[in-house]
């Protein structure tokens, strides 16, 4: 891998960890993975995280589905991950770019989530304006929660939140800047959310 | 906040979440925070994460101490966070730059950790070479684990791993590129680590 190879593939990736705050964490993680149709993405799990790669729509669909299945157990769950495009490193999984567009996970169960995200458009002197534009978009979409150091708070129903994340990622990567990174940290069923659920 | 204000403060920040995979997660988090001397950093916790800000050495010292205290409970713990410098947004916490240099947390208990990190030097056409240089440094330091999509695996004793992270961050930010971001995802006491502990 070298700098010249960056940005040569349109494959999108998401490296994430799912953290159920329960003694039964193995059962919750394995259950969420099993209940999600991951056949449209390349997937690999190691001792710290899982990476999925494929078409953007499938990557976001699978990420949301795994999170929602874990959330439906009712336990306090956190999702931490990084979406990336434009610096493939190698081509493992590129075959998944030929998958049909049909989304394979369609569970519409409502679920309040509170999250924080940051956009990192690489090698772009105008990167701050990309960030401000997508934060403004969050306000327009009604999912903006609050400003903070190093991130922006995004909350609401899981479907609205993931729709915003995919839209922000799509728009930020279309800026002719090839290498884009977006970090997301999400908290669900937290005791800290009492009083803010469904607002 | 606008682009021109980026990079005006040398304050370092770390926005993180600690995830103990146990029904007693509140007790483990609160215990780890209580046992750590955080007086040298500005700190704020919301419903998703905690941010600490101050001198680089104190930020890394506090991050390690909180993680180590949680690890010593023996439960499976994950740490996910983003170190940042150069885009302060505002000046909250800048007073902490006047703190004495003496590190306030000195627990040297050994603890195996497995982790993954990514460096994002912003607005730098040569950012890939910064990344490669720090990955090479991990190999020299004996903490490199494996290459992977979107990150590099770093493991070993918690003190060696945090020493490497602080050194990599220090070197990458000294490249005359003002805005630097480093994500770290760490797993401790994981059932997935059986067989690799203390190697």
Image (tube, coloured by chain):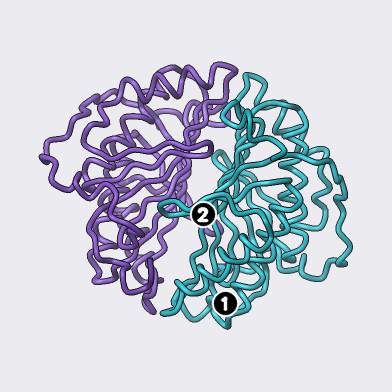
Chain colours: A cyan, B purple
For the point 60% across and 34% down, the residue is A19
Chain of the residue displaying label 1:
A
Q: Position of residue B37 (x, y in %)?
A: 25, 27
Tell me which label, 2 or 1, sits earlier in the chain: 1
- In the picture, measured across the screen, residue A97 lies left or right of residue B71, that is right
- In the picture, measured across the screen, residue B187 lies left or right of residue A187, that is left
For the point 38% across and 38% down, the residue is B44
Q: Which residue is mark 1?
A: A7
Q: Position of residue B171 (x, y in %)?
A: 25, 60
Dot 2, how many residues are within 10 Å of its Cα: few (below 14), some (14-19), or many (20+)? Answer: some
Instruction: Give the quadrant of residue A104.
Output: bottom right
For the point 42% across and 38% down, the residue is B50
The circle drawn on residue B188 is none
Chain of the residue displaying label 2:
A
Residue at mark 2 to residue at mark 1: CA–CA distance: 26 Å
Q: Nearer the viewer, residue B46 or A52?
A: B46
Q: Which residue is mark 2?
A: A152
């Amino acid at each position: 891998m070298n700098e010249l190879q960056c940005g040569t593939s349109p494959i999108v990736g998401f490296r994430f960890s799912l953290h159920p705050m329960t003694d039964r964490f193995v059962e919750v993680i394995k259950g969420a993975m099993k209940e999600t149709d991951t056949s449209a993405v390349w997937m690999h799990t190691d001792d710290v995280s899982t990476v999925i790669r494929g078409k953007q729509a499938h990557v976001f669909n699978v990420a949301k589905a795994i999170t929602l299945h874990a959330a439906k157990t009712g336990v306090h769950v956190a999702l931490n991950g990084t979406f990336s495009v434009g610096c493939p490193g190698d081509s493992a999984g590129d075959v998944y770019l030929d998958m049909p567009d049909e989304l394979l996970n369609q569970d519409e169960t409502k679920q309040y989530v509170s999250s924080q995200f940051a956009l990192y458009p690489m090698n772009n002197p105008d990167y701050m304006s990309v960030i401000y534009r997508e934060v403004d978009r969050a306000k327009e979409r009604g999912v903006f929660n609050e400003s903070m150091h190093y991130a922006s708070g995004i909350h609401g129903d899981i479907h609205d939140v993931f729709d915003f994340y995919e839209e922000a990622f799509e728009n930020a990567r279309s800026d002719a800047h090839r290498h884009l990174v977006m970090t997301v940290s999400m908290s669900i069923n937290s005791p800290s959310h009492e009083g803010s659920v469904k607002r």
